[in-house]
C-alpha cells in the first residue's frame, strides 16, 4: 500500500515511516522540514531498496493548497496518516492562531484533496489534551472531552470534522489520542530531536548529560501523592504500531463511512519524580533539578485506558516498562 505520511520527518512520523517500510508498505512523506529532519528520513528510509520499496519525500506545506493538490496529483496514495505539526499545550495557550490555523487548515486541506482523489482512509494524530481535566482515571474514550487549551480544542474540532465527513462523504478515519509518546527506536537510529526540547524524558536525560541547566520541575503542589504531575508514557514504537493496526482496521471496513477514536497510552501513570528516579536507575547518574512554578495548561493526572485499542485493534504494546522506554531514549542520546 502507498501511504501518505504528513509530517513523516518528525519524531513519531519518522518511526512510522520505518514501521511502514518494515511492513512492506511504501511511504510517501510530505514534510516542510521546518521541525522535522531530513537526516531522520535518511535513517528511516534505510533498507527500503533491499525490500523493493521506493519511499518518496515530497517537500511541501499542508497549509499551502497548491502544494497539497500537486502532491495528490503526482503521488497516488491509498491512505493518509496526518501527524499534527504542533503539539504543545503550553505553546498553544501563548500562540492560539498557530494551533487553530495549523491544525484546522492543514487537516481541511488534506481532507479536501484526499476526497477529491477518492482516498477514503485517514488517520489523524489527536491528543489526550482533548479530555481537558478529566474527572475519572483511567480515561476511556467515552469520557467527556472538555479541552482547556487551543491544542486540545483544535484536535477535538478535527475529530468532529472527521465524524461529519464519515457521514457525508463516506470517509473512513481514526483519531488516535496520544498520551506521552517517548523513547526511541530500539536500534538507536531514530529518536526525539526537538529544538527547543520541552518534553520531560529528553529534558531529564539532557540534564544528566549536563547539556542543559538543572531540570525545571513544573510544580510540586499538585493533588498527587508526591505533588508532581502524573502522565502516561508510551513507547514511540508502540505508537507507530497503533497506527499500523489502525490502518489495517480501516482497510477491513467494507461499508461506507467510519470514525472511531482510540487512546494510545500504556494505562500506567508516573509522576515527574518517578520518571526522574527511573532515569537515575537506568543511567546510574543523578538528575540535577529545581522545583519551579506550574506550567500553564498542565492537568494534574492523565492516564489512559488502553482497553479499546487492545480489544478493537489488537494493539499489544511491546515496551510497557518505563525503564525500557528511558533506556532506548538514553541510547539515542548517547549516540
Ligand atoms: N515537565 C517538567 N519539566 C520539563 C518538562 C516537563 O516538569 O522540563 C513536566 C510537565 O509539567 C508535565 C510532564 O512533565 O507534567 C510531562 O510533560 P511533557 O512536556 O513531556 O508532556 P505533556 O504532558 O505536556 O504532553
Image: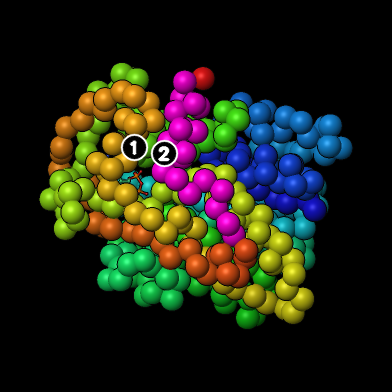
Residue 81 placement: quadrant:
bottom right
Instruction: Find residue 178 and report its horizontal and vertical position in percent.
Output: 47, 55
Q: Is 115 in front, or is 254?
A: 254
Residue 295 located left or right of residue 306: left
How was the colour assigned to the protein in this rendering? rainbow
Q: Which residue is mark 1?
A: 278
Residue 241 located left or right of residue 222: right
Q: Which residues are magenta?
A: 315-334
Q: Is 233 in front, or is 284?
A: 284
Q: Residues within 10 Å of mark 2 (few under 14, many from 20)?
A: some
Is residue 47 among the parts visible in the rendering?
yes
Magenta residue check for 319: yes
Q: Residues within 10 Å of mark 1 (few under 14, many from 20)?
A: some
Which comes before the other along the chain, label 2 or label 1? 1
Q: Which residue is mark 2?
A: 323
Label 2 with label 1: CB-CB less than 8 Å = yes
Amino acid at each position: 500500500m502507498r501511504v501518505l505520511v504528513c509530517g513523516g520527518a518528525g519524531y513519531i512520523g519518522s518511526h512510522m515511516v520505518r514501521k511502514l517500510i518494515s511492513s512492506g508498505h511504501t511511504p510517501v512523506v510530505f514534510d516542510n522540514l521546518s521541525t522535522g529532519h531530513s537526516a531522520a528520513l535518511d535513517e528511516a528510509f534505510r533498507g527500503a531498496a533491499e525490500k523493493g520499496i521506493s519511499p518518496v519525500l515530497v517537500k511541501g506545506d499542508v497549509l499551502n493548497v497548491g502544494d497539497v493538490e500537486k502532491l495528490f496529483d503526482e503521488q497516488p496514495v491509498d491512505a493518509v496518516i496526518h501527524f499534527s505539526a504542533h503539539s504543545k499545550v503550553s505553546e498553544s495557550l501563548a500562540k492560539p492562531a498557530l494551533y487553530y490555523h495549523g491544525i484546522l487548515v492543514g487537516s481541511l486541506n488534506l481532507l479536501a484533496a484526499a476526497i477529491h482523489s477518492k482516498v477514503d482512509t485517514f488517520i489523524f494524530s489527536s491528543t489526550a489534551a482533548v479530555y481537558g481535566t478529566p474527572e475519572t482515571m483511567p480515561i476511556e474514550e467515552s469520557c467527556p472531552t472538555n479541552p482547556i487549551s487551543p491544542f486540545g480544542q483544535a484536535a477535538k474540532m478535527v475529530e468532529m470534522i472527521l465524524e461529519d465527513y464519515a457521514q457525508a462523504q463516506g470517509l473512513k478515519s481514526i483519531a488516535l489520542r496520544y498520551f506521552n509518546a517517548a523513547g526511541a527506536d530500539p536500534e538507536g537510529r531514530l529518536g526525539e530531536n526537538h529544538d527547543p526540547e520541552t518534553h520531560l524524558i529528553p529534558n531529564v536525560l539532557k540534564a544528566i548529560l549536563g547539556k542543559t541547566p538543572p531540570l525545571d520541575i513544573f510544580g510540586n503542589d499538585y493533588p498527587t501523592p508526591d505533588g508532581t504531575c502524573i502522565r502516561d508514557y508510551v513507547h514511540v514504537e508502540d505508537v507507530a504500531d497503533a497506527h499500523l493496526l489502525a490502518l489495517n482496521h480501516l482497510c477491513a471496513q467494507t461499508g461506507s463511512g467510519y470514525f472511531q477514536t482510540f487512546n494510545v497510552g500504556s494505562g500506567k501513570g508516573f509522576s515527574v519524580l518517578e520518571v526522574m528516579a527511573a532515569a537515575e536507575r537506568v543511567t546510574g547518574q543523578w538528575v540535577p533539578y529545581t522545583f519551579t512554578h506550574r506550567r500553564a495548561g498542565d492537568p494534574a493526572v492523565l492516564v489512559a485506558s488502553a482497553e479499546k485499542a487492545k480489544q478493537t485493534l489488537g494493539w499489544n504494546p511491546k515496551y510497557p516498562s518505563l525503564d525500557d522506554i528511558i533506556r532506548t531514549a538514553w541510547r539515542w542520546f548517547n549516540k
